[in-house]
Each structure stands twice: as C-alpha cells, then as structure tokens.
Image (cartoon, rainbow, N blue to C red):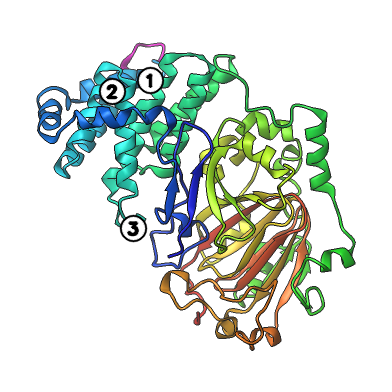
C-alpha cells in the first residue's frame, strides 16, 4: 500500500477518508490508499496536548473499577446527550425518555464490549465525560479511540473501536455545544463530522440527528454564520464564475491532454433515451455512452452555480480533500478542512502547484441538503441494480484521476464544468500494465500524460475512445472499463456506482 500524509489544518479534528466496499474483495479506490497508512501529522487537536498527562493518571486497574462500579448504566451514559435528543411531543416527554433509554442501552453495551477488549482507560474517560460533563475526559476518550483506529490497517480495526470513536465525538460535541457560542457550535459540528467520516455505523443516526440540531440552531442565529467567508464578496463570486464558464479552444485543450486525444473513436453521444433502450443498446453489451442533457432538471444544475448557496449550506462542514496533482504521486496528501476553506483553496494563487480536490467522497450522505439537489438516474435500475456508492467530485481545473478501473457500473453526472474522459475496454487490460500488487491491481502503471514507451511499449497502440463531458451530461462506464479523467474547468460531478446480479466481464 502506498504511504501518504494526512495533515490537519485546524485544531478541532483528525484525518479521514471514505471506506472501501465491504461486499467484495475489491481493489482499492483512490481514497483507500490513504486509509490508516503512512505518516499522520498533527494527529492530536491542539487543545488535546494537555491530555497526555491526564491519560497517564488512568491506569488500567483504576479505570476498570471506575467504569464497572460507578458508571456503566444506560441512565448515566445518556445524560450528556440531552441536547441532541428529539424534543418531546405535545402529549408529554415519553419520546424523549424512550430515545434516552434506547441510546443509553446502545452506549452501555458498546462500553462493555470495549471493556472486554481491554479499553479500560477509554471507558473511564467516556463515562466521566457523560456523567460529569468533563470536556477534558471527552477529548481524552476521543484521542484514545483515534489511536486505536490507526494502530493497524483499516481492515483489521474492530467495529467496536470505530463505534467508540463515534461515541467520543458525540461526547465532545455535546459538551462543546453546552459551552455555548458560535465557536463552540463550530467545534461541535467538526467533531460530529469526524464521527461520520471515521466512526462506525452504530451511532450514525445519533450523529446525523445531532448535526441537524446544531445546524438548525445555527440557522436560528445561535452560533455564527454558514462558513468562513468564501463567496461573501464580489471578487470571490467573479473568480467562481470565471472558473465555471471558462472554455478553451480545441488547440489549447489538446495541449494539456494525453497524446492522440480526441483524434480516435469518440464516445457515442445520445439525447435522453428510455431505460429499455439503455439496457438494450449499452448496458447488456457493456458499451459506454454519453447521455446529453439528462440531468438538466436537477436543482443542483442551478443552485450549485451560486457559491453563496454552497457556502451557506456546507461552509462549516468538515470534508477530506486531496492536495496534489495525482493521487499516486509521492507529494500527494489528504487534509481535513471546512468546505469554506476548500472553496478558498480552489482559487488560491498557488492552486496550480497544490491542486485541492474533494474526490470520491460520500458528501451527500454527510450533507443532506445537497442530496436533495440531485436524483438517482433511472438507469441505475438496469439489471436489478442496487446502488452501492454515491460520491462527489469537486475541484478546480487541472485535477487528474490516473488510469484505473472500478468493479461497479458507473453513471457519472457532470453537474458543473467540463471534464475529459478516456476509456479503454476491459478486454485489453494486460496492455495497460496493471500494478502487480493485489491492492493496486485496478490501477495502471502507465502515466498517460507522459508514457514511457520503453517500459510500456504496447499501450501507445491500444484502441481507446474519448470525449468531453459538458454540463448536464451523464456518462455510463461499464464495470472494469479503464478510464483516465482530467478536469478542463472548475468542476462538480456526481458518480453513481451500482451492482447487479449480472456478473462483471472477465479479465482484469
């Protein structure tokens, strides 16, 4: 597995990336390359530095006694989550009480499981945070869970510790909100986002409910604005629109594309077609196609052009971004920053040297308001389809996804901007020189932007098809078809991966 760096850019969170599919032994996606591998800089939030001394006071015997004799009960552990529980109905407080009891049972069971795995210090800190409202204990518990997440490869991290991390994030967030003020709510929101990004599934509903309440309180004026200021002045808006609307002439575009681009077979382009025609003409014969104008009715097609809308909806939310031209390069790294900071970095003066890309991230699971702006294409029903991944791809001109393939059917929606795609059939995989390592076998060793013909002599003569996706286009990529992608402008895209009962094509 490649090593990488994940770097903090503020004091309230840790690194994160998206999980790999659990239903198959799939080769890694770009985000998998960063998961729990390599060197992590600034793993501790700055306010946590003092917790090292605090942690040393919690030896295993005292932690176990504290946890088992005093605090592991549903009643105690639910106390610090009152701010995040649903409001009682008009008939009384039964819904709140029921939610508290259910949440307390889940958390108590989780802490018993962590205790059985030897996590006595974590349990003691988590219980102290819940019972006493101790923020330092909550931060210490989060730190301990964080260290467990990075003690081994992600595939070997136990479910309980991922859930424990989410629990600690809930503790931190509740106590940050209790502290009041806009800064406290921003810190709470970051903690909750980190719980979604890095935590397990046990407390996901609680995390989402807590986020909804924090966001609602902020909207009522209880805690600051919608972000750090990107898009608040005319210059920002002008830069944004310039990046979206820029169109180079063909000669200029060809200068940045791989050799032979747009000179061979073009990806077939069709206007909107029926599901039956899509299945008959493209899905069953595994043939790519661009469907023009298919997503023009999406609210995202107009709403996302307004940077102030994106800032208001997502500005304070924490997201993982890639920094570097290509995710296989040695200087590539990931950072966790707010969406506002990401917007600012996209048009910063050194953007060309340090391209910042929000890539292959389940943004719409995290930020529900943006999910309402898009729709799952009916073509995802082909083959009795079951949606597996819904990811966002958002970045400036010049981002590159090197040649690789995926195991899923893929519908790639170009919401804003333009992108170049080059596709190679799954049948000629050997001529594209996949990496020999199992974890990288879906990635080609060939750099299409600078092909080494001596090392990879067959690639230059292999047939491919290519084309440019315009705003409103939808591209179908069959399973295991190799693809290279380059953005030709500021670009916001959505990918829909789905699996069917029809087996994927043979070959690697």
Earlier sequence position, callout 2 versus callout 3: 2
Q: Is residue 68 magenta?
A: no
Q: Which residues are magenta?
A: 89-94
> Is 13 positioned to the left or the right of 310 in the image?
left
Q: Are marks 2 and 3 in contact (CB under 8 Å)?
A: no
Q: Position of residue 416 (x, y in %)?
A: 74, 49
Q: Position of residue 155 (x, y in %)?
A: 34, 58
Disc 1 element: helix
* Residue 202 appears in the figure: no
Disc 3 element: helix
CA separation, marks 2 and 1?
9 Å
Please tell me whether residue 157 is drawn above or below residue 426 in the rendered image.
Answer: above
Q: Residues within 10 Å of mark 2 (few under 14, many from 20)?
A: many
Q: Position of residue 349 (x, y in %)?
A: 74, 43
Q: Position of residue 450 (x, y in %)?
A: 69, 74
Residue position marked by numbered label 1 in the rendering? 175
Give 395 or 112, whichever is nearer the viewer: 395
Earlier sequence position, callout 1 versus callout 3: 3
* Residue 251 appears in the figure: yes
Residue 155: image tag: 3
Q: Residues within 10 Å of mark 1 (few under 14, many from 20)?
A: many
Quadrant (top left, top right, bottom left, bottom right) of the N terminus: bottom left
Instruction: Determine which quarter of the picture holds residue 192.
Output: top left
Magenta segment main secondary structure: loop
Please tell me whether residue 83 is drawn above or below residue 195 in the rendered image.
Answer: above
Please tell me whether residue 124 is drawn above or below residue 33 in the rendered image.
Answer: above
Residue 232: image tag: none
Residue position marked by numbered label 2 in the rendering? 129
CA separation, marks 1 and 3?
31 Å
Q: Residue at x 59, y 63 (%)?
A: 410
Instruction: Determine which quarter of the picture holds residue 140.
Output: top left
């Amino acid at each position: 597995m490649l090593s990488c760096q994940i770097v903090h850019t503020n004091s309230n969170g840790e690194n994160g990336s998206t999980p790999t599919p659990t239903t198959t032994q799939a080769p890694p996606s770009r985000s998998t390359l960063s998961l729990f591998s390599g060197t992590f800089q600034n793993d501790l939030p700055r306010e946590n530095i003092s917790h090292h001394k605090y942690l040393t006071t919690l030896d295993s015997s005292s932690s176990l006694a504290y946890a088992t004799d005093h605090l592991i009960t549903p009643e105690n552990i639910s106390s610090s989550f009152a701010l995040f529980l649903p409001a009682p109905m008009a008939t009384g407080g039964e819904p709140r009480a029921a939610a508290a009891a259910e949440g307390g049972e889940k958390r108590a069971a989780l802490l018993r499981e962590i205790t059985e795995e030897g996590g006595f210090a974590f349990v003691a800190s988590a219980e102290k945070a819940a019972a006493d409202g101790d923020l330092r204990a909550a931060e210490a518990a989060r730190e301990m869970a964080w260290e467990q997440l990075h003690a081994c490869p992600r595939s070997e991290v136990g479910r309980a510790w991922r859930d424990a991390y989410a629990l600690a994030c809930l503790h931190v967030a509740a106590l940050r909100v209790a502290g009041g003020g806009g800064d406290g709510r921003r810190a709470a929101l970051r903690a909750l986002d980190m719980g979604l990004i890095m935590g397990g599934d046990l407390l996901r509903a609680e995390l989402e409910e807590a986020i909804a309440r924090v966001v609602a309180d902020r909207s009522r004026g209880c805690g600051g604005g919608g972000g750090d200021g990107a898009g608040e002045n005319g210059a920002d808006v002008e830069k944004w629109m310039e990046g979206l609307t820029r169109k180079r002439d063909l000669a200029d575009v060809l200068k940045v594309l791989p050799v032979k681009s747009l000179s061979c077979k073009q990806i077939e382009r069709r206007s909107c077609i029926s599901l039956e025609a899509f299945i008959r003409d493209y899905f069953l014969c595994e043939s790519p196609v661009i469907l023009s104008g298919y997503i023009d009715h999406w609210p995202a097609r107009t709403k996302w052009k307004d940077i102030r809308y994106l800032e208001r909806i997502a500005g304070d939310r924490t997201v993982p971004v890639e920094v570097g031209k290509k995710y296989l390069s040695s200087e590539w790294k990931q950072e966790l920053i707010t969406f506002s900071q990401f917007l600012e970095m996209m048009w910063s003066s050194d953007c060309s040297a340090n391209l910042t890309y929000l890539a292959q991230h389940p943004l719409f699971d995290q930020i529900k308001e943006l999910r309402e702006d898009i729709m799952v294409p009916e073509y995802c029903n082909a083959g009795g389809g079951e949606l597996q991944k819904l990811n966002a791809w958002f970045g400036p001109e010049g981002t590159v996804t090197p040649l690789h393939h995926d195991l899923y059917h893929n519908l790639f929606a170009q919401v804003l901007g333009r992108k170049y795609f080059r596709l190679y059939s799954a049948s000629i995989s050997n001529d594209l020189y996949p990496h020999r390592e199992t974890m990288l076998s879906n990635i080609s060793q060939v750099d299409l932007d600078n092909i080494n013909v001596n090392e990879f002599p067959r690639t230059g003569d292999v047939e491919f098809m290519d084309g440019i996706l315009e705003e409103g286009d939808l591209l179908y990529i069959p399973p295991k078809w190799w693809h290279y992608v380059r953005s030709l402008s500021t670009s916001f895209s959505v990918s829909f991966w789905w699996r069917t009962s029809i087996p994927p094509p043979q070959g690697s």
